[in-house]
Amino acid sequence: MNYTWIISGVWLVFFLYWGISARNVKETARAEPTLSRAIHLALFAGAFLLVGPDAFSFGLLGARFWPDGAAFIGVIVLIIGIAFAIWARYHLGQYWSGTITIKEGHKLIRTGPYGLVRHPIYTGIVVGMLGTAIATGEVRGLIALLLVIVAYIRKIGIEEGFLKAQFGDAYARYIHEVKALIPFIL
């Protein structure tokens, strides 16, 4: 069975939710530089171009690493990842931004998914891309996953600098108590 429409639909729901919910956020007090945001978006766009409709399904990029008949496992992983990211985005509420920012009156959120990992939106998106890679079953999906991981590791480094500057010892305790991306591990 070809899961392309389901995969596309799950990501479409994600992006629609992101766009709609972005309208109800607090004013920005401090933001990352434009070039930094552009680098993140370029990595992210490259990942989605790779896993888009079979345009890059040739040569080594199209080589299979996962059996086609087990693609449903990837779809399930994708749905779990995106659901986790949406839960985290909803829980963060008015303090969310696609760009690394500190909002006016910013508060450190440590509840809900933020009690499991410090960057649950990133965790959910990485898991979603892992599911997409598995569902695609081709090397291009693994390269897309690698691009997303690189984008978020880079972004975490910048974001944690902002949060340490804003919340000081409270954020240092949070780092000590809660892992960044994978509960109890990383």
Image: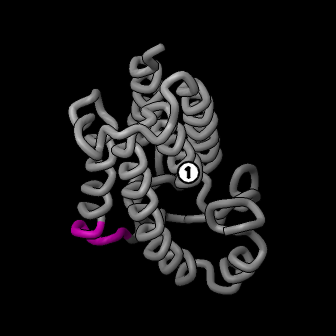
Write the residue at 51% across / 46% down: 125
On screen, 114 above or below 166?
Answer: above
Whole-percent x, y for residue 163 in the image: 55, 75
Left or right: 18 as drawn, with respect to 70: left
Q: Is residue 43 left or right of residue 65?
A: left
State the scheme by which the image is colored: one colour
182 drawn magenta: no
| In the image, farthest residue toward the top | 1
Which residue lies under the disc numbered 1?
A: 121
On screen, residue 53 versus residue 21, left or right, reads: left
Q: Nearer the viewer, residue 20 or 11?
A: 11
Which quadrant of the figure contains the C terminus?
A: bottom right
Q: Position of residue 43 (x, y in %)?
A: 30, 57
Q: Residue at x 29, y 44 (%)?
A: 61
Identify the residue at image location x=42%, y=49%. 142
The three-letter code of the residue at mark 1 reads Ile
Q: Kindly identify the residue that appears in the image at 43 percent across and 33 percent down.
A: 136
The vertical placement of 38 against 177, above or below, is above
Q: Position of residue 16 (x, y in %)?
A: 41, 29
* Magenta stretch holds residue 33: yes
Determine whether 65 is above or below 174 in the image.
above
Q: Which range is magenta?
A: 31-36
Query: Residue 164 lies in what quarter of the image?
Result: bottom right
Q: In the structure shown, which secondary structural element does the residue marked by tag 1 occupy?
A: helix
